[in-house]
Image (cartoon, coloured by chain):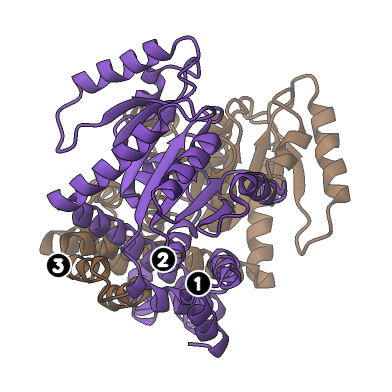
Chain colours: A purple, B brown
Amino acid sequence: MPLDTADLVDRLLAGQRRALARALSTVEDGDDEALRAIVAALHPRTGGSHLIGLTGSPGVGKSTLTSAVTQAMRNRGLTVAVLAVDPSSPFSGGALLGDRVRMADHAVDDGVYIRSMATRGHLGGLSWATPHALLVLEAAGFDVVIVETVGVGQAEVEIASIADSTVVVQAPGMGDAVQAAKAGIMEIADIHVVNKADRDGAQRTLRDIRGMLDMAPPGEWTPMVLATTAATGEGVEQLVEGLLAHRRWSQESGRHLRHRRAAARVQVREILLAQVRRRMARLDEGEALEAVVAAVATRELDPYTAADRLLAEIG
Amino acid sequence: MPLDTADLVDRLLAGQRRALARALSTVEDGDDEALRAIVAALHPRTGGSHLIGLTGSPGVGKSTLTSAVTQAMRNRGLTVAVLAVDPSSPFSGGALLGDRVRMADHAVDDGVYIRSMATRGHLGGLSWATPHALLVLEAAGFDVVIVETVGVGQAEVEIASIADSTVVVQAPGMGDAVQAAKAGIMEIADIHVVNKADRDGAQRTLRDIRGMLDMAPPGEWTPMVLATTAATGEGVEQLVEGLLAHRRWSQESGRHLRHRRAAARVQVREILLAQVRRRMARLDEGEALEAVVAAVATRELDPYTAADRLLAEIG
């Protein structure tokens, strides 16, 4: 491991916030070698946090709800990190601005850390860096890590494969539950939340969700359906209780370990695929490819045998 | 090589049309092992045909033009195979129907072979099977193989990387040359054809193409701009002369070999990628993946070291 990476890891584990910020920047933007060194050093220190995915369409009040949940967790003495995965353009500066706005509520609290991350380079999904950033936040020792995903579709389904507990947030009048069901996000919820529950139509949205759940085949966990008004704090305590109850159930039922294993499978496969892509890119620069291609062009070698030879180079 | 594949290859090389049809079906639908055996056996017999790509938007008259070019090549004593890559749904039966309609003009001519191929499974591009089908047709000894691609976009650019000579067909009033330039298909043409040249606006379309070419940086080959009316045969002789002239220039200038080498590079990389994907799929069924994933989940192994171990299994 490079000396400065070892130093960074030491300072991170000693609780230095600046080291945490730098480690997150490194896994987000850094070169592969630094990323790899950080992951290898921090990985043994992870596995202890409660990873919460909080997801839903734009406008349902996810940021306010995340802030309220963070405060309620803090009131229980738990430290909280928030990773806001933001699909905004890397050129908009939206992520940085978002951090500052979000920090305002918890600015003087050392037990809260908030970070935004753009989803650049990973169209419609979580950024490649998200699992690595979670690993850094877990190693930094936060009791709770909330991943908030904006947008609809792929990101929601991906977050459920990473998070220990997944909260799907809806709001009255923000499109109906049938739409959510079609998008496949009903199935991923451990807890359904209808936020902005003081608005007209909240009861109907709650009823729709419950009706949909009644039709679903029973699973090992029966999803909760809760109403919150994050702006006033109404229902937030129940949501936090629900999250902690889900966490306890997960650990006692063995679901936690199975789920973490599934997440590890996804992560290892992603890294493997990235390694293969990188080695293939390196092939393009080397002489082995040109040599077999020339032989294929002159018909001395058939393309399958050529591919076999290159495969041996990649492995 | 399986005995029946060896027999198939023998009969194909002996000129049996039924063996040709079966070999094409095998490379289109067959299992990997048969595909591989056929490619390995036939590859040394290839490289002699003039591969012509003929492409353009729907409605410009590509089928009629292909048929006219085929007849003109036959008049010169050259044998011709046509591979029509059809983006129609595999469920529509469009490809098969197309074959029958196309065959009508050349039904009694043993020196012409026509085959349609759906682009299933390879969205917006040429089918994975196309380069393999070309290899079969080359090995079968056709002097000329015309690949006709329907649709716009990716397929056109892909065909130029495979074909020795690429013809881009436009028609008056079928969208202007600026659109074609935007789609990136102007650059791939060795020969531009304005078909349906008896229609209003043909002169303007010709002028637009020439104007666009005047603005392009000069290359080693100056693209021809020709007018045809395929339905009457007008201009078809000039197109065939142009194709043969391009062929001669390619071979004399060394461009032919460079281009074939580039095509081989693309093909070898595609096969390599397919092999990697297959081995990764096989990983999912084996025990090595589960073993490392379990070790990652319990933090005995970090995900990068885990990926390295699996990479060794793949290679």
Badge 2 marks a residue whose secondary structure is loop
Q: Chain of mark 1?
A: A
Amino acid type, residue under disc 1 in the picture: Gly
Residue B201, image x and y in percent?
A: 80, 23
Query: In terms of sequence position, does the residue under pointer 1 or pointer 2 come before the other?
Result: 1
Amino acid type, residue under disc 3 in the picture: Glu
Amino acid type, residue under disc 2 in the picture: Gly
Badge number at residue B287: 3
> Mark 3 touching mark 2, by CB under 8 A?
no
Q: Residue at x 73, y 34 (%)?
A: B179
Q: Residues within 10 Å of mark 3 (few under 14, many from 20)?
A: few
Q: Residue at x 75, y 52 (%)?
A: B223
Judging by the rendered image, the residue that carries numbered circle 1 is A15
- Looking at the image, can residue B298 be seen? yes
| Residue A269 horizontal side relative to residue B259, left or right | left
Judging by the rendered image, the residue that carries numbered circle 2 is A141
Q: Quadrant of the C terminus of chain B?
A: bottom left
> Mark 3 touching mark 1, by CB under 8 A?
no
Q: CA distance from mark 1 to mark 2?
A: 8 Å
Q: Is residue B108 above or below residue A145?
A: above
> Mark 1 touching mark 2, by CB under 8 A?
yes
Residue B52, image x and y in percent?
A: 55, 50
Badge 1 marks a residue whose secondary structure is loop
Q: CA distance from mark 3 to mark 1?
A: 39 Å
> Which is more toward the observer, B84 or B290?
B290
Q: Quadrant of the N terminus of chain B?
A: bottom left
Quarter residue B89 falls in: top left
| Residue A198 horizontal side relative to residue B55, left or right | left
> Which is more toward the observer, B129 or A289?
A289
Quarter residue B72 falls in: top right
Residue A105, image x and y in percent?
A: 61, 44
